[in-house]
Amino acid sequence: MPKISIVIPIYNSEKTLKPCLESIFNQTFKDFEIVAVNDGSTDQSKSILDAYQDKIKIINQKNQGAAAARNTGAKEAVSQFIIFCDSDIILKPDALKKMHQALILHPEASYAYSAFIFGKKTFKLWPFDAAKLKKMPYIHTTSLIRKKDFPGFDVTLKRFQDWDLWLTMLEDGHQGIFIDEILFTVKAGGTMSNWLPKMFYYLPFLSSVKKYQNAKKIIQKKHNLY
């Protein structure tokens, strides 16, 4: 049984999928399985996946959204540890090794997260801080999680599904351990395409800012953060 299950939610990812997969195959840590969930793609994603069918587990389903695709993959995962790797992510060669080592060295932690790069911006982050997590989303979905502590993603949420996950785990008594290194990059224009520079949030008339604030209120209400 592999030590790590890598779940990749995929929707119309023909431009980024192959580099993502190759970055996984280039990992120094080799004891893993890949569970690729094709969430109703209409481009060439399925054809790309089929070319790797001898190396990965492929699940095809009707389009239900990223959260549902991740949950589907998690149900099929057989490993003690699980990581959700979006198809627009490139892992550093030692990403899995360092995340796995962090959880082995820190049995009190339920997940390991790191700094990362989105486009040209570096998210350096900081050690786990429960108070700060309640104020803002700062931990990326691509973190290594002990599967026994994973509660599943809330498929009713349109945004902040990752923030909701970490807050739910916090309420269950589970915390993370920070790795002070950049372990992956996210292609600009991918799943984090709605990210805006901080200065823009002082311009409340922007529709993207309004959507951000409304989504934030939904999470705050769900987790009683007012």
Image (cartoon, rainbow, N blue to C red):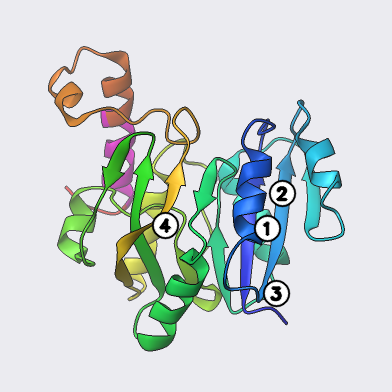
Range shown magenta? 213-222
- Residue 187, placed above or below residue 199: below
- Cα distance in 3D space between marks 4 and 1: 16 Å
- Amino acid type for the residue under numbered disc 3: Val
Using a 10 Å C-alpha cutoff, classify the residue at mark 3 as few (fewer than 14 neighbours), some (14 to 19) or many (20 or more).
Answer: some
Are the residues flagged by discs 3 and 2 in contact, CB closer than 8 Å?
no
- Residue 82, placed above or below residue 13: below
Q: Earlier in the sequence, mark 1 or mark 3?
A: 1
The residue nearer to you, when weighing 192 against 211, is: 192
Which mark, residue 73? 1
Please give the residue where the numbered disc 3 appears in the rendered image: 78
Which mark, residue 34? none
Please give the residue where the numbered disc 4 appears in the rendered image: 165
Are the residues flagged by discs 1 and 3 in contact, CB closer than 8 Å?
no
In magenta stretch: residue 62: no
Q: Earlier in the sequence, mark 4 or mark 2?
A: 2
> Quadrant of the rendered structure where residue 113 is?
bottom left
For mark 4, give the secondary structure.
Answer: helix
- Cα distance in 3D space between marks 4 and 2: 19 Å
- Amino acid type for the residue under numbered disc 4: Leu
In magenta stretch: residue 214: yes
Q: Position of residue 20 (x, y in %)?
A: 61, 47
Are the residues flagged by discs 1 and 2 in contact, CB closer than 8 Å?
yes
